[in-house]
Image (cartoon, rainbow, N blue to C red):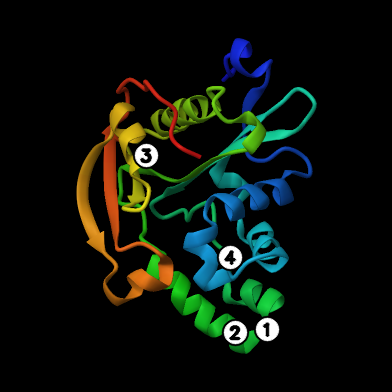
């Protein structure tokens, strides 16, 4: 799927990651979700190192510039197949050591919600700072819809925190509708948000605006 050349001066969306793109994708995710991931991963190079090990290149679409730069990624999850950011206890231990890996794994489990059957769950849409505002997010969302249709899935789902009303409004303009709220309870202060809003949209609905990176 081609990205609008007039907006980003060329580029294309590919399944998977470009050569050498794992570290760049990890950096994008770490920056976009720094507050949410601070509890299980901390900050700095170790967080990026874990993400580089944990991401699954089989569950991501990449927006790539003609010169090979990674402009953005859209990670997703499908029931029974896992998702974009996975990783194992061993991966955590490799980066943080075994004692730390055990409690970090427990914190991760508090964030994890598996994708329901029959849908493609959008885990993340991240756009590189220099590419924002150029339609990359919209193109990635459209590409996710194509992926869902090719898999015979009838719906896109995602979650957005209550601390990001801008993203929620943009997703609403893109055709998503609220589908329940999960309250974090005593874990809210740890993660930096009190509620997670579930959103859904049938495959085939129009996309009118880019999601926030």
Using residue 182 as the reference point, say whether residue 115 is left or right of it.
right
Q: Nearer the viewer, mark 1 or mark 3?
A: 3
Query: Distance of mark 2 from mark 3, alpha carbons?
Result: 34 Å
Query: Distance of mark 2 from mark 1, alpha carbons?
Result: 6 Å
Circles 3, 4 touching at the beta carbon (< 8 Å): no
Instruction: Identify the element where label 4 is drawn.
Output: loop
- Residue lying at the far left of the rendered structure: 180
Question: Does residue 143 appear anywhere in the picture?
Answer: yes
Can you identify the residue that label 4 sits on? 87
Question: Does residue 154 appear anywhere in the picture?
Answer: no
| Lower sequence index among marks 1 and 3 | 1
Quarter containing the N terminus: top right
Can you identify the residue that label 2 sits on? 100
Using residue 50 as the reference point, say whether residue 139 is left or right of it.
left
Query: Distance of mark 2 from mark 4, alpha carbons?
Result: 15 Å
Can you identify the residue that label 1 sits on? 97
Q: Nearer the viewer, mark 3 or mark 4?
A: 3
Circles 2, 1 touching at the beta carbon (< 8 Å): yes
Query: Distance of mark 1 from mark 4, alpha carbons?
Result: 15 Å
Residue 194 percent across, percent down from the top left: 30, 63
Q: Nearer the viewer, mark 1 or mark 4?
A: 1
Can you identify the residue that label 3 sits on? 166
Using residue 24 as the reference point, say whether residue 152 is left or right of it.
left
Q: Nearer the viewer, residue 199 or 78?
A: 199
């Amino acid at each position: 799927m081609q990205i609008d050349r007039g907006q980003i001066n060329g580029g294309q969306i590919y399944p998977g990651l470009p050569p050498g793109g794992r570290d760049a994708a990890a950096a994008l995710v770490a920056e976009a979700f720094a507050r949410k991931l601070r509890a299980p991963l901390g900050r700095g190079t170790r967080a990026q190192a874990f993400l580089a090990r944990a991401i699954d290149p089989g569950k991501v679409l990449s927006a790539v510039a003609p010169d090979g730069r990674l402009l953005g990624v859209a990670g997703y999850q499908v029931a029974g197949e896992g998702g974009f950011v996975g990783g194992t206890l061993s991966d955590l231990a490799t980066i943080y050591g075994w004692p730390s890996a055990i409690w970090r794994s427990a914190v991760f489990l508090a964030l994890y919600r598996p994708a329901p059957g029959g849908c493609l769950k959008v885990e993340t849409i991240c756009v590189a700072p220099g590419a924002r505002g150029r339609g990359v997010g919209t193109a990635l969302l459209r590409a996710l819809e194509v992926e869902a249709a090719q898999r015979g899935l009838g719906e896109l789902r995602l979650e957005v925190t209550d601390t990001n009303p801008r993203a929620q409004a943009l997703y609403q303009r893109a055709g998503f509708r609220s589908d329940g709220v999960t309250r974090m309870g005593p874990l809210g202060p740890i993660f930096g948000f009190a509620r997670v809003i579930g959103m859904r949209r049938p495959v085939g609905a129009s996309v009118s605006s880019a999601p926030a990176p």
